[in-house]
Image: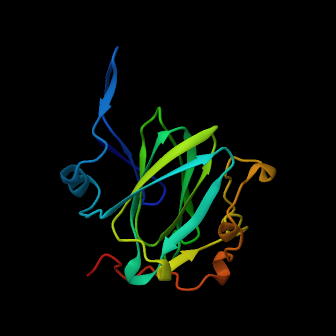
């Protein structure tokens, strides 16, 4: 397993060691021991999977306060542009984002720590997307920001006319209007 740094220190790409031959391939998609040593000690408690078609854009989502979540995301089938946006007020990278293409060919994963909003756009005909969370989903703690916030200015690699949003995702506030963002000086991993 190789850990690749991004422009934001806390957000990292994980590239597994893939072993292939004429029969196919094998790789270890997650090792608690290696993750704790190479990324950070963490305990994932929930796995989720979604299936989407081309043009679907999900995000930008986060869980607030004590319900904050870290995510480890990957693509099982297809191709997405995955996005992690720093929403920690006072952070030197506040409003900045990391964009990583995750595919069933590159087997890359992206670690999104607490204090970041997350979203992805589907670039292939369909995608099966999986992610681990280190905190259980709490509906009362849902937070989100608009996918098209001009202050963040994400290039989702989709023409606007191809973007497919849920009614909920179409109604998220701009970052400047979002409530209950994170504070850079608070450790959201402390129990």
Comparing 131 with 166, the one in front is 166
Residue reaching furthest to the top: 22
Question: Residue 150, how many percent across, how many down?
Answer: 73, 67
Residue at x 26%, y 53% (from the top left corner) = 35
Residue reaching furthest to the right: 161
Residue reaching furthest to the left: 33
Q: Judge left or right: residue 31 versus residue 139.
A: left
Q: Judge left or right: residue 101 versus residue 38.
A: right
On screen, 84 above or below 62? Answer: above
Question: Residue 105, how many percent across, how many down?
Answer: 47, 32
Give the quarter of the figure containing the C terminus.
bottom left
Residue at x 43%, y 77% (from the top left corner) = 138
Residue at x 46%, y 60% (from the top left corner) = 8
Comparing 130 with 93, the one in front is 130
Let me know if residue 89 appears in the view.
no
Question: Residue 60, how many percent across, how many down?
Answer: 59, 66
Where is residue 40, by image quadrant? bottom left
Where is residue 27, by image quadrant? top left
Let me know if residue 115 appears in the view.
yes
Give the quarter of the figure containing the N terminus.
top left
Question: Residue 42, how many percent across, how many down?
Answer: 26, 64
Where is residue 48, by image quadrant? bottom left
């Amino acid at each position: 397993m190789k850990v690749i740094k991004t422009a934001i220190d806390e957000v990292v790409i994980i590239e597994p060691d893939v072993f292939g031959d004429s029969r196919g391939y094998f790789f270890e998609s997650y090792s608690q021991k290696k993750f704790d040593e190479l990324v950070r000690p963490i305990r994932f408690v929930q796995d989720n999977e979604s299936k989407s078609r081309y043009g679907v854009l999900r995000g930008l989502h986060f869980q607030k306060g004590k319900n904050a979540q870290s995510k480890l995301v990957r693509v099982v089938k297809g191709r997405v542009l995955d996005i992690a946006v720093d929403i920690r007020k006072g952070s030197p990278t506040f409003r900045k984002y990391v964009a990583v293409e995750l595919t069933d060919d590159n087997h890359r994963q992206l670690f999104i720590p607490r204090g970041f909003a997350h979203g992805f756009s589907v670039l292939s005909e369909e995608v099966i997307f999986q992610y681990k969370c280190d905190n259980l989903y709490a509906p009362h703690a849902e937070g989100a920001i608009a996918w098209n916030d001009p202050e963040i200015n994400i290039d989702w690699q989709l023409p606007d006319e191809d973007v497919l949003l849920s009614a909920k995702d179409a109604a998220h506030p701009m970052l400047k209007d979002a409530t209950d963002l994170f504070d850079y000086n608070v450790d959201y991993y402390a129990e």
